[in-house]
Amino acid sequence: MASIETIAAIATPPGQGGVGIIRLSGPNSRAIAKSIIGTLPAPRHAHLASFNDASGQLIDTGIALFFPTPHSFTGEDVLELQGHGGPVVMDLLLKSTLDAGARIARPGEFSERAFLNGKLDLVQAEAIADLIESGTASAARLAVRSLQGKFSEKIHQLVESVTNLRIYVEAAIDFPEEEIDFLSDGKVSADLQCIVDELKQVSDSAKTGRLLRDGMTLVIAGLPNAGKSSLLNALAGREAAIVTALPGTTRDLLREQIQIEGMPLHIIDTAGLRESDDPIEQEGVRRARAEIERADRLLWVFDDHIDPDNASIQQATLPQGIPLTLIRNKIDTGSRAPQIVQTAQGVEVSLSAKEGLGIELLQQHLAECVGYNGDVEGEFIARRRHLDALQRAGEHLCIATTALEHEVAGELVAEELRFVQNALSEITGEFSPDDLLGKIFSSFCIGK
């Protein structure tokens, strides 16, 4: 999909540096190269050149690189001018490319052109932005895996399996007198179950990748004075929250971001959940409950000395479906040792946040909750839209399974498989509305 416009942008971060790069892509790149450096560099060879403005005045001396279509990142003619990395020099050099016929690139437009020209699929294009924005080494390695096409390969395999099954079902529909036999012979059911299992594996890996990319949000909740702020301080490794013996000290949300073995965690300390006549404390409780609803995991803290049976959780009216870890705090007031046990209510970690006892057990438990064991091999980075598409695909597979088992309705099974195929194809961009593409690429930095 060739563009008629040539775009240009500064491809290096703003500020001073040893090297600054102006990147161009489009049909006028050759003419602009001749205008600025007086010649067209040999393809893929570094060319030492003087960079001149429209009046012939010298701007800088540096390296020019030319990548002819289609052997370039965008699939178009691409020119890179590498000069000294001062902001004034870069601005003058960029202005000279605009005077020669280029226009300023939109955020993400280079990657968008690479996608539109078939050099990358949508997952790989997004992985470029994820790699640039990586906050941890694990997230960076996952982004590289997606950029190499590992995630896309999994999606293509799923789409192929769905397509083959859809063809088989629609073939059965074409022979109505044999349709029931086709759909009841066990092949459709077996193939459908294989797709369900494969989709679950991909979804689990994608969820792990999303948490390693964006971080897991942990909300610390419990009654006043259970030790929530002390737990926040222990996990953060510093005095992030005020700790007193006075109930209701924490009235607003306190947020900290930490890493556990390269895994980002967003920790939110909340006001103690209790009835109060104080309007400020009431607002704190309201905000606490709102954060609990959005949490990836809830850490419910209770006092081992005052509430050894954790009766407080029965009165908390917590929302259903949120993963829960019970924190038996203040074990230093008794003889209980730090430990992790499985209870009827969920995993319980016994610790003393104030003394730091058992914190390493909690950190290990949180890493296991994400599915992270320090090894990202086999995982891939994922975004929320990927998870949404996988979830929709799973829902349509569930409907298809029900239609097959209870109604033996070939048309309905085939239609649901089409929905599955479309949902999965949205991930790689083979089936994507234009407004989705615009939203995705607008979040990229300029020059990428």
Image: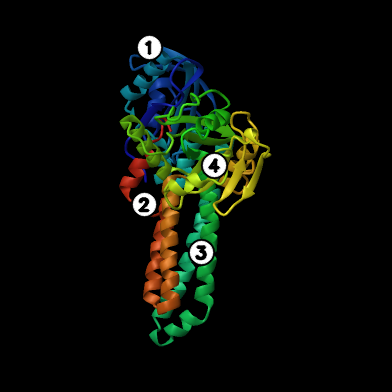
Q: Does label 4 or label 1 sit earlier along the sequence?
A: 1
Q: Which of 84 and 182 lies nearest the eye of the viewer?
A: 182
Residue pointed to by mark 3: 196
The amino acid sitting under disc 3 is: Val
Rendered position, 167 above or below 219: below
Q: Does label 2 or label 1 sit earlier along the sequence?
A: 1
Residue 344 horizontal/vertical position (percent): 57, 54
Disc 1: CA contacts within 10 A as few (<14), some (14-19) or many (>=20): few
Query: Mark 1 near mark 3, Cβ–Cβ under 8 Å?
Result: no
Q: Nearer the viewer, mark 4 or mark 3?
A: 4
Disc 3: CA contacts within 10 A as few (<14), some (14-19) or many (>=20): some
Could you tell me which secondary element the residue under label 4 belongs to?
loop
Residues under labels 2 and 1: Cα distance?
Answer: 47 Å
Q: Residue at x 39, y 45 (%)?
A: 116
**141 on left or right of 173:** right
Residue pointed to by mark 4: 307
Residue 234 horizontal/vertical position (percent): 58, 29
Residue 189 horizontal/vertical position (percent): 51, 74
Q: Which numbered dot is residue 432? A: 2
Could you tell me which secondary element the residue under label 3 belongs to?
helix
